[in-house]
C-alpha cells in the first residue's frame, strides 16, 4: 500500500503535482496538497484553460468554475461563473467549510469572495484576448465552430493519514455563452471522493460528462471491487457507447481515479495527458492513447511516459511570443 499519492489531468499540471507531492512527502495534508497544486496551475498565464490567462466566453469575459471536496467528511464547496477573482479553487475550499450555501454562482460568488478577503484581479490577459480576437475573425470569415478547448485541471490527493481530497478548476469552454457551466463544479459529474473508497475527476466536454455523472460512477465501480484503471476506463467506455447509440456522437471524455491505497488509473476516449506521483513514484507526465476497434469502441489504452523533449516542445509552444499567435 502506498503511503500517499496525487494524480492530475493534463500535462499543464506537472509543476503543480510536483509541489503537491512535496507537501504529501513531508506528511502534509491532502487538502493543502491539491489546493496548492491547483493554485500553481491557475496562476500560470500560459495555461489557456485555467485561471489567469484562461480563454474567455463569447463576450470576451473570463468566467471561472472550481470545486473542492473532502473525502473524510464529504464536504463540498463549488463556484461557477465567477469573474475577476484569483484562485477560484481556494474560494471553493473556503465554501466547503460551511453547512449551507456551499455552491455559489456569478455575482453571489463574487460577493462571497470579496467578503472573505480573496484577491480581486482582472483574469483576462492580452494573450487570451488576442486568441479570442483571432477566433472571432475565423468564426465570421470561415464559419468555423466557436467551441474549442475545455481542459479542466483536476487533482486527487491521498495523504499519509489516509485522508483524501479532490479539486477542480477551469475557465470552461472557449467562446461559451455567458453563464454556461460545465461539469467541473458539479458534484458526481466533475469530481467525487470518499475516504472509504477513493476519488475520481473528469475533463472533456462537460455537456456530455454531466449526462453520465462519470466521477461518481467511477468511484462506485471502485467500491464494487474494480481497480482505478478498470473503473475509470469501463465508465468512460460504457457511457461513450451509450452516447453514440442514443445521440449519435460522444464528446471527448477523460477520467482520472485513485483509490484509498494510492493506486491510480485513467479512462479516456481521446488522446489524453495526465500527471501522477506516489510514495513509490516520482512525478511523471504520461501520454494516454486509445486504440479503437472498427465500431469506434476502445480496444485498449496505451500509456507511456512523456519524454523530456516532448515537455520542452510543449512549453516552447505555449510560451510563443504574442506576435506569433
Image (cartoon, rainbow, N blue to C red):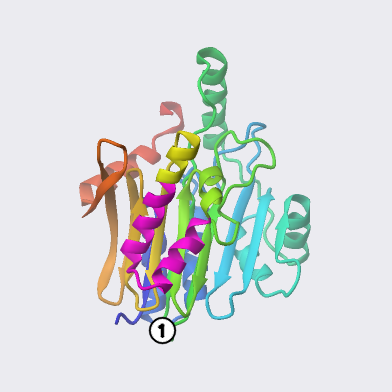
Q: Is residue 271 left or right of residue 253?
A: left
Q: Which residues are magenta?
A: 213-240
| Residue 27 placement: quadrant | bottom left
| Residue 274 placement: quadrant | bottom left
The foreground one among 87 and 289 is: 289
Query: Within the magenta stretch, is there residue 202?
Result: no
Residue 305 visible somewhere in the drawing: no
Query: Within the magenta stretch, is there residue 237?
Result: yes
Q: Main secondary structure of the magenta part?
A: helix
Residue found at x 34% / y 45%: 315
| Residue 156 placement: quadrant | bottom left
The foreground one among 299 and 321 is: 299
Residue found at x 71% / y 74%: 98
For label 1, the residue is 27
Residue 167, how many percent across, how many down? Answer: 52, 64
Residue 8, how many percent across, how many down? Answer: 40, 60
Residue found at x 57% / y 16%: 140
In this rendering, the answer to whether 324 lies above or below 224 is above
**Quadrant holding the N terminus:** bottom left
Q: Is residue 28 left or right of residue 291?
A: right
Amino acid at each position: 500500500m502506498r503511503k500517499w499519492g496525487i494524480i492530475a489531468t493534463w500535462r499543464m499540471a506537472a509543476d503543480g503535482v510536483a509541489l503537491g507531492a512535496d507537501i504529501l512527502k513531508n506528511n502534509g495534508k491532502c487538502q493543502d496538497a491539491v489546493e496548492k497544486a491547483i493554485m500553481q496551475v491557475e496562476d500560470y498565464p500560459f495555461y489557456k484553460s485555467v485561471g489567469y490567462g484562461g480563454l474567455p466566453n463569447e463576450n470576451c469575459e473570463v468566467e471561472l468554475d472550481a470545486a473542492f471536496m473532502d473525502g473524510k467528511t464529504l464536504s463540498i464547496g463549488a463556484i461557477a461563473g465567477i469573474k475577476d477573482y484569483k484562485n477560484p479553487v481556494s474560494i471553493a475550499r473556503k465554501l466547503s467549510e460551511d453547512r449551507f450555501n456551499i455552491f455559489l454562482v456569478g455575482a453571489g460568488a463574487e460577493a462571497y469572495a470579496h467578503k472573505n478577503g480573496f484577491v480581486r484581479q482582472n483574469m483576462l490577459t492580452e494573450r487570451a484576448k488576442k486568441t479570442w480576437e483571432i477566433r472571432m475573425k475565423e468564426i465570421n470569415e470561415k464559419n468555423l465552430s466557436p467551441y474549442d478547448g475545455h481542459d479542466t485541471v483536476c487533482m486527487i490527493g491521498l495523504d499519509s493519514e489516509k485522508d483524501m481530497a479532490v479539486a477542480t478548476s477551469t475557465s470552461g469552454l472557449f467562446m461559451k455563452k455567458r453563464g454556461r457551466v460545465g461539469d467541473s463544479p458539479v458534484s458526481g459529474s466533475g469530481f467525487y471522493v470518499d475516504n472509504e473508497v477513493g476519488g475520481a475527476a473528469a475533463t472533456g466536454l462537460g455537456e456530455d460528462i454531466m449526462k453520465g455523472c462519470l466521477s461518481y460512477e467511477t468511484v462506485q465501480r471502485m467500491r464494487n471491487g474494480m481497480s482505478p484503471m478498470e473503473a475509470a476506463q469501463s465508465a468512460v467506455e460504457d457511457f461513450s457507447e451509450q452516447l453514440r447509440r442514443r445521440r449519435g456522437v460522444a464528446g471527448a471524455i477523460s477520467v482520472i481515479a485513485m483509490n484509498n491505497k494510492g493506486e491510480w488509473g485513467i479512462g479516456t476516449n481521446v488522446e489524453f495527458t495526465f500527471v501522477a506521483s506516489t510514495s513509490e513514484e516520482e512525478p511523471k507526465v504520461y501520454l494516454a492513447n486509445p486504440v479503437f476497434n472498427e465500431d469506434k469502441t476502445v480496444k485498449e489504452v496505451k500509456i507511456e511516459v512523456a519524454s523530456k523533449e516532448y515537455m520542452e516542445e510543449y512549453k516552447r509552444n505555449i510560451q510563443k511570443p504574442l506576435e506569433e499567435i
